[in-house]
């Protein structure tokens, strides 16, 4: 049942795997947060195996987690909210620091804050005031991440509460 909601699809092109991911949100209540943690725990072995597969891999999508304080406008007020819980952030740290995945945006922009947001609440004036979160990622194997030459977040038009994260890769 890990993907009963259709949250993962992988396309293979030669030695490159391009994955689209939509990690569950836990913001609608305790039951959904428990489901999110369950998916994260069951997904980790797959991410480890994928990393060790020898393939170039990039996982693109909504991870529903802001990893660091610089990844959201109001980090102090969100420490106990889904998407910025210590357990969620630690899980991403495990992916990066122990498993060896690379946050491609942060590789190219290690300290950027306000320009890095990819999601804004539909409540209040979050979009207008740029009170956002960076919860959409392209996370890649190190060899593929090394091919990234530029990133941008497309905000010229608003399609939804998320903005597309664009990464240009050389020779990809």
Image (cartoon, helix red, strand yellow):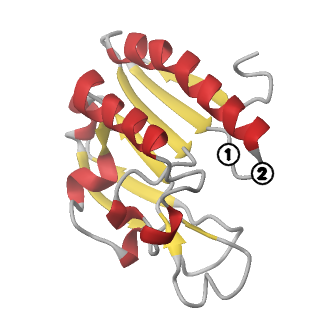
SS state under label 1: loop
Residue 45 on image: x %, y %? 46, 12
Q: Quadrant of the C terminus?
A: top left
Residue 159 showing in the rendered view: yes
Left or right of 150 on screen, residue 2:
right
Q: Residues within 10 Å of mark 2 (few under 14, many from 20)?
A: few
Q: Which mark is residue 39?
A: none
Left or right of 109 on screen, residue 21:
right
SS state under label 2: loop
Left or right of 30 on screen, residue 163:
left
Residue at image position (48%, 59%) is 79
Q: Quadrant of the N terminus?
A: top right
Residue at image position (54%, 21%) is 41
Q: Are marks 2 and 1 in contact (CB under 8 Å)?
A: yes
Residue 51 on image: x %, y %? 34, 18
Left or right of 83 on screen, residue 142:
left
Kindly identify which residue carries mark 1.
Answer: 25
Compute the Cα span from label 2 to label 1. Answer: 8 Å
């Amino acid at each position: 049942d890990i993907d009963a909601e259709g949250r993962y699809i992988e396309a293979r092109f030669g030695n490159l795997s391009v994955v689209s991911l939509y990690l569950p949100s836990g913001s609608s209540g305790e039951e959904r947060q428990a489901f999110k943690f369950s998916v994260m725990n069951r997904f980790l072995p797959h991410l480890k195996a994928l990393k060790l597969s020898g393939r170039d891999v990039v996982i693109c999508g909504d991870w529903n987690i802001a990893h660091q304080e610089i990844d959201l406008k109001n980090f102090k007020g969100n420490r106990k909210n889904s998407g910025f819980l210590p357990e969620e952030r630690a899980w991403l740290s495990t992916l990066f620091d122990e498993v060896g995945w690379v946050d491609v945006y942060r590789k190219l922009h290690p300290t950027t804050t306000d320009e890095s947001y990819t999601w804004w609440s539909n409540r209040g004036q979050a979009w207008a005031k740029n009170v956002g979160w960076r919860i959409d990622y392209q996370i890649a194997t190190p060899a593929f991440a090394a091919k990234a030459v530029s990133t941008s977040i497309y905000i010229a038009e608003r399609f939804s509460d998320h903005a597309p994260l664009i990464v240009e890769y050389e020779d990809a």
